[in-house]
C-alpha cells in the first residue's frame, strides 16, 4: 500500500511486515517506522492537511491514525467488528470510508473521522461479492467501489444510494482510482490492463459533480 502526501514531499507505505513507513521523496530516507498492526498493512491514506496518515491491517478490525511529524499513533478507531477493512479512503469533507473484503462482514461504512461516529452503512455489492477497493471522488459526495462482480459502482455518501455503474471490465477488479478533477476512473483487474473510464460519457448525464 502506498500514498503520497498532498505536498508531494513524503510517501507513506504499508508493508507485509506489519509496519507503516514514512519516506522523504527527495532524500529517499525513511523518516519514521510505525508498528502496531497484527499483520500485513493493506491500505494507507493521508488526510487532506497532510498532518496524519491512516493505515488498515488485513487482520485488524480498525484503522490506526498516525501523526506524520512524530510517527506516533494518536487514535485506533474501530471500523468493523468482524473482518478487517480491506481498503479505505477519505472524502473531501473529512469522512473515513472503509470497505471489508466480504459484504457479509460489513460492506462499506462511512464514519466521521474526528469522532469515529458511524454516519452510514452502504450495502455495496450482492451475494458473496468481495470488495477489492474503494476511492473517493475528489469533487462531490461520492465514492466508487470495485470488486469481484466485474463492475465499478458509484455511491452517494449522503444517502447510500447507487448513483451509477461502469460495466464491461470482464474480470475481477482489484484497484480503482479517480483523477483529481473527478472526470476519469482508472481501474486495474485480472486481465493485466488498466482501464480508463470517462465519467461524463459512461454515466450518460449522471455526473457526480
Image (cartoon, rainbow, N blue to C red):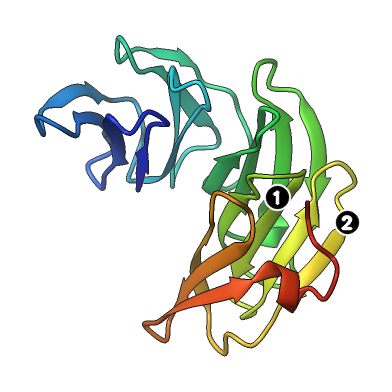
Residue 88 visible within the image: yes
- In this view of the protein, which residue sits in the foreground, 107 or 112? 112
Q: Is residue 54 above or below residue 167?
A: above
Give how far across and how far down residue 7 sits, in percent: 37, 28
* Residue density around tag 2, few if under 14, some if 14–19, many if 20 or more, within 10 Å: some
Residue 100 visible within the image: no
Tell me which residue sits at (31%, 41%) in the image.
Answer: 14
Tell me which residue sits at (24%, 31%) in the image.
Answer: 21
- In this view of the protein, which residue sits in the foreground, 165 or 81? 165
Say which label, 1 or 2, has the lower sequence index.
1
> Which residue is label 1 attached to?
108
Q: Is residue 45 left or right of residue 110?
A: left
Give how far across and how far down residue 189 sits, in percent: 46, 77
Task: Classify mark 2: helix, strand or loop.
Answer: loop
Dividing the picture into quarters, in which one does residue 205 lie? bottom right
- In this view of the protein, which residue sits in the foreground, 206 or 66? 206
> Which residue is label 2 attached to?
161
Tell me which residue sits at (48%, 38%) in the image.
Answer: 60
Give how far across and how far down residue 144 sits, in percent: 66, 58
Disc 1 to disc 2, C-alpha distance: 12 Å
Q: Is residue 85 left or right of residue 28?
A: right
Task: Classify mark 1: helix, strand or loop.
Answer: strand
Amino acid at each position: 500500500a502506498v500514498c503520497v502526501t498532498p505536498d508531494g514531499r513524503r510517501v507513506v507505505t504499508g508493508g507485509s511486515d506489519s509496519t507503516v513507513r514514512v519516506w522523504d521523496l527527495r532524500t529517499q530516507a525513511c523518516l519514521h517506522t510505525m508498528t502496531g498492526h497484527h499483520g500485513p498493512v493493506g491500505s494507507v491514506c493521508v488526510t487532506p492537511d497532510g498532518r496524519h496518515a491512516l493505515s488498515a491491517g488485513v487482520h485488524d478490525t480498525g484503522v490506526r491514525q498516525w501523526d506524520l511529524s512524530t510517527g506516533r499513533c494518536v487514535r485506533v478507531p474501530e471500523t468493523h467488528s468482524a473482518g478487517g477493512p480491506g481498503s479505505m479512503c477519505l472524502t473531501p469533507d473529512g469522512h473515513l470510508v472503509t470497505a471489508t473484503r466480504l459484504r457479509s462482514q460489513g460492506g462499506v461504512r462511512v464514519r466521521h473521522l474526528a469522532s469515529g461516529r458511524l454516519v452510514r452503512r452502504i450495502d455495496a455489492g450482492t451475494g458473496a461479492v468481495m470488495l477489492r477497493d474503494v476511492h473517493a471522488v475528489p469533487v462531490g459526495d461520492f465514492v466508487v467501489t470495485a470488486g469481484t462482480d466485474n463492475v465499478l459502482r458509484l455511491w452517494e455518501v449522503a444517502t447510500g444510494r447507487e448513483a451509477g455503474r461502469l460495466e464491461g471490465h470482464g474480470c475481477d477488479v482489484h484497484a480503482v482510482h479517480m483523477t483529481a478533477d473527478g472526470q476519469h476512473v482508472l481501474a486495474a483487474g485480472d486481465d493485466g490492463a488498466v482501464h480508463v473510464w470517462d465519467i461524463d460519457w459512461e454515466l450518460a448525464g449522471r455526473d457526480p459533480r
